[in-house]
Image: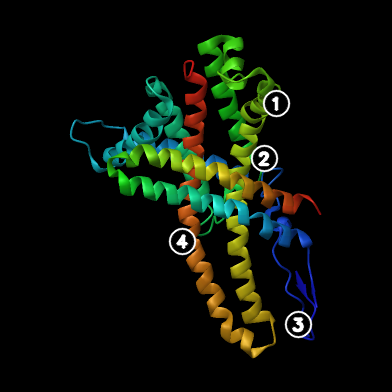
Amino acid sequence: MISGNLNTIGYGLSAIGPGIGVGIVFAAFINGVARQPEARGQLQGIAFIGFALSEALAILGLVMAFVLT
Amino acid sequence: MTMTATAPAPGFEAPGVEDFNLPPVFGTVTKPVLELVLALIIVVVLFAVATRRMQLVPSKGQFLGESFHGIVRNSIARDMIGPEFLKFVPFLTGLFAFVLVNNLFGIIPIIQFPTFSHPSVPYALAGLVWITYTVVGVRKHGFGGYMRISTWPPDVPWWVRIILTPIEFLSNIILRPVTLSLRLFGNMFAGHLLLLVFILGGEYMLFVADDVALKVFSPFAFVMGLVFTGFEAFVQVIQAYIFVMLTASYIGTVLADDH
């Protein structure tokens, strides 16, 4: 028998979306650098901001998993 | 999650939020407070040593300090802020160094507790960032101009504005510092929890559980703990970088002239 909190499963599900989002952000970044290597510096900043924005959702989900009991 | 199986040994208590509420060291001073002071001392001393005898041909210490400053200046401030970036570089460099040292406390032996895994600490830091970019924006454009830049995107039909302006207000003025601090907090908290699960789980398997199979497999838990310590080092550096990068981008957006 396993007892636990359903929040954990909920967080696992909620992490799917941001996971896909982060993947898309970095895929686009890699594509961009492959096509135009000299634009790497500019793209890097944009990529990390996009990464941070999509990751924010996962982080909010993590907080919610602990806050809502 | 508690495993209440047939094993006579006490069930494994998974680490949780309560593991982060450390007892005070003395008085009301807790470990994160001491770490903040320690980080401040480390950052101040390192930069003081690095800039003590400035030469045209830099010594090793000066070179390291200059490289660090150069990363913030060239790859964060200049790209994100625009022509007026130079006066924000000291603030951003200090912020980067402070957040980085505090994050790395999470994997430095003996200390091993990331300061920002307590939400109140990043709240304070994000509050500082919020005050900074608000003051910068109001100084540059006046209060009305700052509000216009934050909530009034140009070339939008009026019926979209009814929805868009409240969202922009909420997102740019209220939620920015919240997500900025929660991102740092969440990453440090989750990372530390991950390490706790592997190390405490391994310890439980090795010493507490009666099952021989668990004892045999316990080294894997410790190895995974080591692997994730390396991963945490990476995450901690990235998060410090992102914190400063977002700060610079917020300053950049409030400084920007009309789009």
| Mark nearer the N terminus (4 vs 3) | 3
- The mark that comes first in sequence, 2 or 3, is 3
Which is more foreground, mark 4 or mark 1? Answer: 1
Residue located 46% across and 61% down the image: B230
**Can you give x and y, in whole percent of width and height, for residue B149 in the image?**
56, 18
Q: Which residue is mark 4?
A: B230
> Label 2: chain?
B
Q: Which mark is residue B120?
A: 2
> What is the secondary structure assignment of the residue under circle 3?
loop
Query: In the rendered image, which quarter is residue B37 located in?
Result: top right
Q: Chain of mark 4?
A: B
Residue B123 position within the rendered picture, expressed as x and y whole percent measured from the top left: 64, 36
Residue furthest to the left = B57
Please tell me which residue lies in front, B157 or B91.
Answer: B157
Residue placed under numbered mark 1 in the picture: B163
- Amino acid type of disc 4? Gly
In the rendered image, the vertical position of residue B163 relative to residue A69, given as above or below: above
Q: Going 50% across and 12% down the picture, which residue do you hit?
A: B140
Closer to the camera: disc 1 or disc 3? 1
Measured Cα–Cα span from mark 2 to mark 3: 37 Å
Determine contact: label 1, label 2, CB under 8 Å.
Answer: no
Marks 4 and 2 in Cβ contact (< 8 Å): no
Q: Earlier in the sequence, mark 1 or mark 2?
A: 2
Residue A67: image x %, image y %? 76, 49
**Quick one: B83 or B34, which is closer to the camera?**
B83
Closer mark to the observer between disc 1 and disc 2: 1
CB contact under 8 Å: marks 2 and 3: no
Q: Chain of mark 1?
A: B
Disc 2 marks a residue whose amino acid type is: Ser
Disc 1 to disc 3, C-alpha distance: 58 Å
> Label 4 vs label 1: CA separation?
45 Å
Badge nearest the viewer, 4 or 3 = 4
